[in-house]
Amino acid sequence: MSSAKKSAERLIKKYPNRRLYDTQTSSYITLSDVKQLVLDGDEFAVVDAKTSDDLTRSILLQIILEEEANGAPMFTSVVLSQIIRYYGHAMQGMMGSYLEKNVQAFTDIQNKFTSGTAGSFEGKPFSPEMWTQFMNVQGPMMQGMMNNYIDQSKNLFVQMQEQMQSQSKTMFGAFPFVPVDKK
């Protein structure tokens, strides 16, 4: 990480009493305030005040847990179970990268879809009803974007498989395996 990025990044310290201290505003903040930083796109890091350990991921996971408990959950039990199964699996690192790239692709599609006049009506954000009407009219365009998303997802998965095959060949290439005749 470059020093320019580090200096632009907001530092939040977490104290043993579980309080979060924003060094930029010199005030204590809540988890809701950290969520707002995420929503605003602000760069920040959360560190343990005593050890300086990076706690950013832990805090983000806490926010996700609260969001999942407070409303309509984004993740089903099936999805969470599948994610848990990848921990300790040989493809754990690739799965994280795969999910990250897919979320980014989905975000890019959403940004294209909501940019310009498509994302507002007379300067006002779309309400759920307006989104429904817009989606009914824009079905073919949305189908094309989703097909593009699916193609990107498929390509990422194929790349992940090829990388695993390459790593396996490299890892096991030194062993003198004898080909098995199939009769």
Image: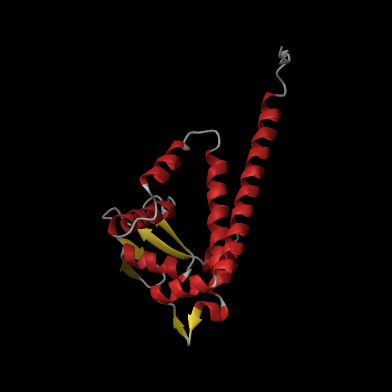
Q: Is residue 1 visible?
A: no
- Residue 94 at x, y = what percent? 57, 42
Q: Is residue 157 above or below residue 103?
A: above
Residue in front for this viewpoint, 157 or 33 = 157
Count of marks overlaid on the render:
0
* Protein image colouring: secondary structure
Name the residue rendered at 56%, 54% in the picture.
102
Q: Is residue 140 above or below residue 167?
A: below
Name the residue rendered at 44%, 79% in the picture.
125
In this rendering, position of residue 67 left or right of residue 122: left
- Residue 7 at x, y = what percent? 53, 66
- Residue 129 at x, y = what percent? 39, 75
Name the residue rendered at 40%, 56% in the picture.
60
Q: Is residue 136 above or below residue 148?
A: below
Quadrant the N terminus occupies: bottom right
Residue in front for this viewpoint, 88 or 136 = 136
Query: Which image quadrant is residue 166 in?
Result: top right
Q: Is residue 71 above or below residue 83?
A: below
Query: Which image quadrant is residue 152 in?
Result: bottom right
Q: Is residue 172 visible?
A: yes
- Residue 67 at x, y = what percent? 33, 58
Quadrant the C terminus occupies: top right
- The single residue placed furthest to the left in the displayed view is 17
In this rendering, position of residue 24 left or right of residue 3: left
- The single residue placed furthest to the bottom in the displayed view is 122
In this rendering, position of residue 3 left or right of residue 19: right
Name the residue rendered at 72%, 24% in the picture.
173
